[in-house]
Image: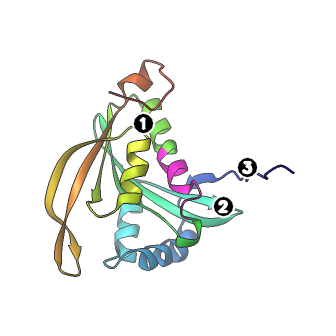
Amino acid sequence: MSAVVNQEKFLVREMEDGDLKRVISIERNSYQFPWSQKIFLDCMAAGYRCRVVLSDGKVAGYCIVAYATCEVHILNICVGPEYRKGGCARQLIENEISKAVESNLREIYLEVRVSNMAAINLYKGLGFKKVGLRKDYYPAESGREDAYVYRLLLKSFVQGVSNLNLY
């Protein structure tokens, strides 16, 4: 008897107004201090890259990204609890890496709560390196929580190296 491997593929596409109800539901079910609907609407209106990942046609997660002159900043990435550890977050980040490389950008930055080991392990596995600490960055039940700053250098991607083991 052989094991069955789930070969499910995810679809990443632009966030649409009709996705907001589900996106906000995921946000509220995932964070003690969630973004408001207005913040998501402002990000969409400002032209940030707002993406959702679909699993079986349903919004499973989302990613909000800001572009600057030569860098990308992942502002918010979240996957619904029922889809976690299934590859959705990885798919969203890999999509942003590909877009950044296509756009000839040099690096991707993000912040992550120091207590969020699942996300930290994902980022490390994708080649991100810890480059800093932001004290008291996130609101927390007991006051504030620090954030690590992670960076992924894209130079190797631009030169055609196809793996994620960078610097």
Which residue occupies 44% across, 31% down?
A: 101
Which residue occupies 43% across, 42% down?
A: 125
Label 3 neighbour load within 10 Å: few <14, some 14-19, many 20+: few
Q: Do the residues labelled 1 and 3 touch (CB within 8 Å)?
A: no
Q: Mark 2 points at which residue?
A: 55
Helix, strand or loop at disc 3?
Answer: loop
CA distance for labels 1 and 2: 23 Å
Q: What residue type is labelled 3?
A: Gln
Q: In which quarter of the image is residue 76?
A: bottom left
Q: Mark 3 points at which residue?
A: 7
Earlier residue among tags 3 and 2: 3
Helix, strand or loop at disc 2?
Answer: strand
Which residue occupies 49% across, 36% down?
A: 98
CA distance for labels 1 and 3: 26 Å
Which stretch is magenta? 84-93
In x, y percent, where is residue 97? 45, 39
Which residue occupies 49% across, 78% down?
A: 25
In x, y percent, where is residue 70? 29, 34
Of the two numbered discs 3 and 2 in the rendering, the one whose residue sits closer to the viewer = 3
> Which of the two residues, 84 or 41, is positioned nearer the viewer here?
84
Q: What residue type is labelled 2?
A: Ser
Helix, strand or loop at disc 1?
Answer: helix
Of the two numbered discs 1 and 3 in the rendering, the one whose residue sits closer to the viewer = 3
Q: In the image as oriented, which residue stretches furthest toward the right?
A: 1
Q: Are marks 3 and 2 in contact (CB under 8 Å)?
A: no
The answer, for residue 76, to whether it is visible in the render is no
Left-right relation of 55 to 167: right
Earlier residue among tags 1 and 3: 3
Q: Mark 1 points at which residue?
A: 100
